[in-house]
Image: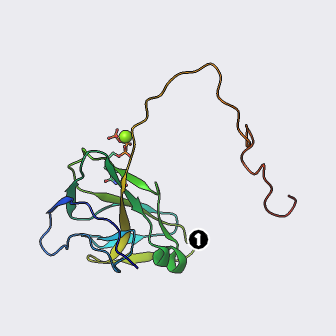
Amino acid sequence: MTDPSTVDVLVTLLDDGVPAPSYAHPGDAGADLVTTVDVELAPGERSLVPTGIAIALPEGYAAFVHPRSGLAAKHGVTVVNAPGTIDAGYRGEVKVILANTDPRETVRLQRGDRVAQLVVQKVEHARFLVARNLPGSHRGEGGFGSSGGFGTA
Ligand SMILES: O=c1ccn([C@H]2C[C@H](O)[C@@H](COP(=O)(O)OP(=O)(O)OP(=O)(O)O)O2)c(=O)[nH]1
Ligand SMILES: [Mg+2]
């Protein structure tokens, strides 16, 4: 497999001992983010978690904070606003809004744990052209399960 194309992103490390984001495997889409603090999440609780990094994305890019599937599957930990959007112009600390969806178990995360992953993507800016009518399409206005789905289809 060939490696994905790359883009240079400047990172400042705001916390000694916190690594720059890194990809666990060469072809991974997401670079792991760690928490700089210990976090305890009771069932249903959420927390704004610092990652110890700030980044400068080139114009025309954004980064998206995604949950990690292992934490989600094993512990019910997710990112509330998934995917969180990091704008190219944002220079503050990247933070992750974690929540514990498990109905019973408290989750304890430790400083240095990888809690989310950052996906860097090219983004387009739209010119929103106001029109009275939109061109027809096969789907039309159908949505929200119009193509069938579970059980009663
Ligand atoms: O998961 C996230 C989401 C956002 N941000 C930072 C970077 C982003 O550029 C900024 C604003 O995010 P967003 O536009 O989603 O939040 P908002 O509620 O619209 O705030 P604002 O009025 O500052 O745009 O907050 C994070 O660090 N983590
Ligand atoms: Mg905003």
Expressed as whole percent of the image width and height from the top left, the position of residue 127 reads 43, 30
Q: Quadrant of residue 132?
A: top right
Please tell me which residue is depicted at 20% across the width and 70% down the height of the picture.
20
Q: Is residue 129 left or right of residue 147?
A: left
Which of these two is toward me, 122 or 146? 122
* Residue 56 percent location from the top left of the image: 20, 52
Q: Which residue is mark 1?
A: 103
**Which quarter of the frame holds ligand 2?**
top left
Q: What amino acid type is highlighted by mark number 1?
A: Pro
Q: Residue furthest top?
A: 132
Work out which quarter of the rendered image holds the N terminus and state it. bottom left
In the picture provided, is 1 more to the left or to the right than 142? left
For the point 38% across and 72% down, the residue is 40
Toward the viewer: 129 or 15?
129
Quadrant of the rendered image containing residue 11 = bottom left
Q: Residue furthest front?
A: 2
Quadrant showing the C terminus: bottom right
Q: Give whichever of 75, 62 is nearer the camera.
A: 62
- Residue 110, given in percent of the width and then of the height, sits at 31, 78
Residue 33 picture quarter: bottom left
Q: Quick one: SS at disc 1?
A: loop
**Position of 21 relative to 63 (above/below):** below
